[in-house]
Image (tube, rainbow, N blue to C red):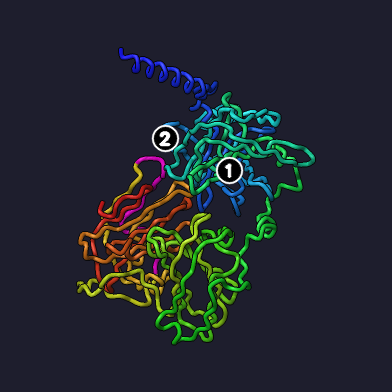
Amino acid sequence: MNRFLSAAAAVLFFSLSCMLSWLPAAQAQSYNVDALSHAVVQVEVPDGAGSGTLVIQNNKAYVFTNRHVVENYHTATIAVLLDVTEPAVTLFNAELRGFSLNYDFAYLELTQYIENPEQPEPFQISRLKEGRYGFSLPALPLNAGLDVGRGENIAIFGYPGLLDSELVYTTGIIASLQYGTLNDQRIPMWYRTSAEMSPGNSGGLAVNSQGQFIGIPTNIAQEHETGGRLGNLLALPFALALMQDETEMTTDWALYRSTHDLELTPAAEPAYGVLSANNSALASGATTQITAGGNVLVNYLGEQCAGYAANAPDYRVNLSELQSVLSVQFEATNQGDDTTLIVQDPAGLWHCNDDFNQLNPALSIHDAEPGSYSIWVASYTEGNFYNGTLTLSNRELRNHSHNHSTIVEQVFTVDNSAQLTLEAEPRFGSSSLHHDIEPRQVRVASNAGGVVNMANQPMSECGGYAGAAANYSVSWQSNSKPLFMRFISNSASDDPMLYVLTPTGEWYCNDDANSETLQPELVLKTAPAGLYRIWVGTFQEGAELQGHLIISSEHQPLNQ
């Protein structure tokens, strides 16, 4: 061998030896990942889901999680892994027992078993201990004195939002520690970790290499220029100390919001101006540019209100005279930006909308009295800010960008006095559907259209014409899971419409799923369990169309 090559080989061998000597040893774990997974639960509330850890303390079953996972709610449903190769299954109701005013920690107690949501059973701690709820809960001692050091190997369990109720396991090390003082005790407060975390992991489980509970994944710190990121774990000793501090723990969300200025303030000066309007000012539509988003979670206003808005209104319109309708809509500059609308009327009532036209919100207030209307545009997810155009008008909203001049055969004679018969038997049948159990889709042949003018019904902003009795009903057996509904007509030039009445009494409607189709679609991101009544209408008066109604727990292209 050439001596230069021999020397180079020797140097290379020496260099590799040195490099390998400095590589960290592969993580050695002394626990069963699949067995431990049964303690990691999915915490579901009406506007989203996060993770939690199920533990037994003082003969009660508690779920430790982050405060922001259950913010503004006193109850949640809990999903558990029955089979580690399948998504989590909703099994329990839980009630909030406390959250910290100043730190991102909350805990709930299991109260009901809801495998059948229509017939909940009282929760039994003995049944959980004996594994008679379909899974074996691993022991997770709550050790406030557990020593955790920099460089220690750890693992994180959780349900990141980028997947469909699937538990994810990632590993890393403790990169740094931060201590804090609570009740004159200096104890670990935060562990920083290199283990991968994503939204949805919040509230999950962090363990050391022995499988011992060390902390709660809470948030991510990221340096945007380089992309560097570390996950923040709320240390278990700090969480346990919080539970013993009566001055720190509460169940009063109103107190929390007022303490941290997390409420909308209608009387504040609007960020983007004030419009004094009469009929003529609104007739052609008044527009203004707005940036949506803020730090106030608006779900405390009601079930239809979602997203994060600024404290002060974005805009205000002062009506000088009665309007038969005041329509408010926002269109984001970038397609895919998810925004919501919140309006307070002169009587102090709140009006909200999430998705009216794709991800853009809009709402109509009928018989709008003179006075001030404060308007907020929110981002659906926290920390996002989206530019777009706010439009105010006194015209009925139309979720439509197509030419409706198609001539159709007049089959129905519309009766403007006709009303929907909500309790009538659905004309094309009914069924049950579950997010995690096959079949996950219902497809039924159905017509569209009828004698009822929907402009005279509760969902008047969509208009259209439908039958008095619902076309179909579905009993949704999952809670706070996405539910998709669409109608595919036999002809692409047909113009059907969808309307749904939810178990909680809210109405939703849609004309066109997007600007490329006349077919309607409704997406309920966090659909509560219960009965959904569905009507299929037509945009054109008197028309009857044929096609297929599809209800699914999974999103599919409109041409399927």
Check disc 2 and give the amino acid type.
Answer: Glu
The residue located at (68%, 60%) in the rendering is 258
CB contact under 8 Å: marks 1 and 2: no
State which quadrant residue 14 falls in: top left
Question: Is residue 357 toward the left or the right of residue 479 in the image?
Answer: left
Residue 365 seen in the current view: yes
Count the numbered circles shown.
2
Residue 86: give its label. Answer: 2
Please report whichever mark, 1 or 2, sits nearer to the chain's N-terminal start.
2
Please state the horizontal and vertical placement of residue 389, each as a whole percent of the image. Answer: 43, 70
Which residues fall within the magenta stretch? 420-438
> Predominant secondary structure in magenta?
loop
Check disc 1 and give the amino acid type.
Answer: Thr
Q: Secondary structure at mark 2?
A: loop
Please state the horizontal and vertical placement of residue 64, each as a whole percent of the image. Answer: 61, 39
Residue 218: give its label. Answer: 1
Q: Residue furthest front?
A: 3
Query: Does residue 176 lie above or below 345 as drawn?
Result: above
> Cα distance, mark 1 to mark 2?
25 Å
Task: Using the image as rendered, state which of residue 58 and residue 285 is in the foreground.
Answer: 285
Q: 10 Å neighbourhood of mark 1: few (<14), some, or many (≥20)? A: many
Question: Is residue 127 toward the left or the right of residue 180 in the image?
Answer: left
Please state the horizontal and vertical placement of residue 555, each as a whole percent of the image. Answer: 35, 50
- Within the magenta stretch, is there residue 116? no
Q: Secondary structure at mark 1?
A: strand
| The N terminus: image quadrant | top left
Residue 423 seen in the current view: no
Q: 10 Å neighbourhood of mark 2: few (<14), some, or many (≥20)? A: few
Pair 1/2: label in front: 1
The residue located at (50%, 50%) in the rendering is 48
